[in-house]
Image (cartoon, rainbow, N blue to C red):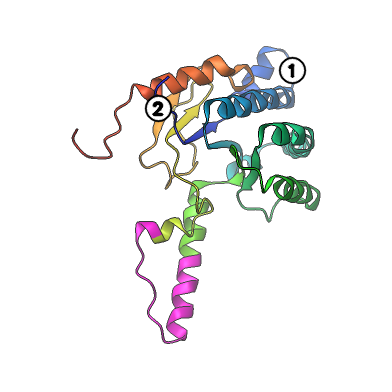
C-alpha cells in the first residue's frame, strides 16, 4: 500500500436492495449496515486515515416513508449508544454534521453526549453526515457570510473579501480537509448532493458491492485504486 488518503468519504448505498434480496424489509438492511460502519471505522484506524465521512441521511431522505424514517432515527440512536466502546477502544472522535433543527430532542441528546465523550480522542475523526445536503451547506455558508458582511457595514467596517479559503470557513466542514477519496457502494455513479463544494478535486471510486456486504477487502481495493491515480489539480506533471 502506498499513500494513505487523509480523508475518505463514503456514500453508504444499497441497504434497501440488500434487504430485498434477503426477502426482508428495508430497515433490516440498514440495521445490518451498521456492522459495515464498525468494520470500516476500525479499518480506517488500522490504516492511519485521519478522517472518515459517512453519508448517513440526506436532506432528501425525508421524502421516504415515515415508518422507514422513524426506524432510521431509532437505529441511529442505538448505534451511537452501542459504538461508544468502539470509539473509546480505537481513540475515535465522533461528530455529526448537518442541519440539526429537524432532528428529535432525544437524538440530539445522544449526539451531544457522544460528541462530548469523544471530544478529546486524537485518532480517527468519524464524521456522520445526518440531514445533510451539499446545496444546503453552500447556501447556509453564503447566508452566514452575508450576515457578517452586513454587520461589518453597519459598524462602518469593510467586509472581508470573499475568497475560497474564507468561504471554507463558513461551511459545516470548517477545519476539516477536503476528501481525498469518495467511495460509493451499490453501483450507483453519482454523489447525490454530498459535499459538493468539498469534492471539487476528490477522486471517486464506485463499487457494485452493496453497503451491508462492504468489508475490509472492499475498502482496501478502493485504497489501491486511489494509489493508481495521478492527482494533478489542473496542473501538468
**Residue with the most extreme top position:** 22
- Quarter holding residue 179: top left
Residue appearing at x 46%, y 32% in the figure:
182
Can residue 12 be seen by looking at this rendering? no
Q: Secondary structure at mark 2?
A: loop
Residue 163 is marked as none
Can you give x and y, in whole percent of width and height, for residue 105 in the image?
79, 53
Q: Which residue is mark 2?
A: 3
Q: Is residue 29 above or below residue 174?
A: above
Work out which quarter of the rendered image holds the N terminus and state it.
Answer: top left
Q: Which residue is mark 1?
A: 24
Magenta residues, start to end: 144-165
Can you give x and y, in whole percent of width and height, for residue 130 in the image?
63, 44
Can you give x and y, in whole percent of width and height, for residue 216 in the image?
57, 18
Q: Earlier in the sequence, mark 2 or mark 1?
A: 2
Distance, label 2 to label 1, CA atoms, is: 40 Å
Residue appearing at x 62%, y 20% in the figure:
17
Q: Considering depth in this image, is 133 or 6 the residue closer to the camera? A: 6
Q: Considering depth in this image, is 149 or 174 the residue closer to the camera? A: 174
Amino acid at each position: 500500500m502506498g499513500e494513505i488518503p487523509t480523508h475518505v468519504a463514503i456514500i453508504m448505498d444499497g441497504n434497501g436492495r440488500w434487504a430485498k434480496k434477503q426477502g426482508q424489509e428495508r430497515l433490516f438492511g440498514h440495521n445490518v449496515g451498521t456492522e459495515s460502519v464498525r468494520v470500516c471505522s476500525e479499518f480506517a484506524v488500522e490504516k492511519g486515515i485521519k478522517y472518515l465521512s459517512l453519508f448517513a441521511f440526506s436532506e432528501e431522505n425525508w421524502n421516504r416513508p415515515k415508518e422507514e424514517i422513524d426506524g432510521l432515527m431509532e437505529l441511529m440512536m442505538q448505534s451511537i449508544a452501542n459504538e461508544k466502546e468502539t470509539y473509546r477502544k480505537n481513540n475515535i472522535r465522533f461528530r455529526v454534521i448537518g442541519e440539526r433543527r429537524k432532528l428529535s430532542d432525544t437524538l440530539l441528546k445522544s449526539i451531544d453526549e457522544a460528541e462530548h465523550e469523544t471530544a478529546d480522542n486524537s485518532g480517527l475523526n468519524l464524521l456522520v453526515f445526518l440531514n445533510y445536503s451539499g446545496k444546503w451547506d453552500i447556501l447556509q455558508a453564503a447566508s452566514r457570510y452575508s450576515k457578517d458582511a452586513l454587520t461589518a457595514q453597519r459598524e462602518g467596517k469593510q467586509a472581508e473579501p470573499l475568497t475560497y479559503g474564507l468561504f471554507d470557513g463558513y461551511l459545516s466542514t470548517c477545519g476539516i480537509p477536503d476528501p481525498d477519496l469518495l467511495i460509493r457502494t451499490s453501483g450507483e455513479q453519482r454523489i447525490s448532493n454530498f459535499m459538493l463544494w468539498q469534492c471539487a478535486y476528490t477522486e471517486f471510486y464506485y463499487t457494485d458491492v452493496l453497503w451491508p456486504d462492504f468489508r475490509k477487502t472492499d475498502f482496501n481495493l478502493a485504497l489501491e485504486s486511489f494509489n493508481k491515480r495521478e492527482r494533478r489539480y489542473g496542473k501538468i506533471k
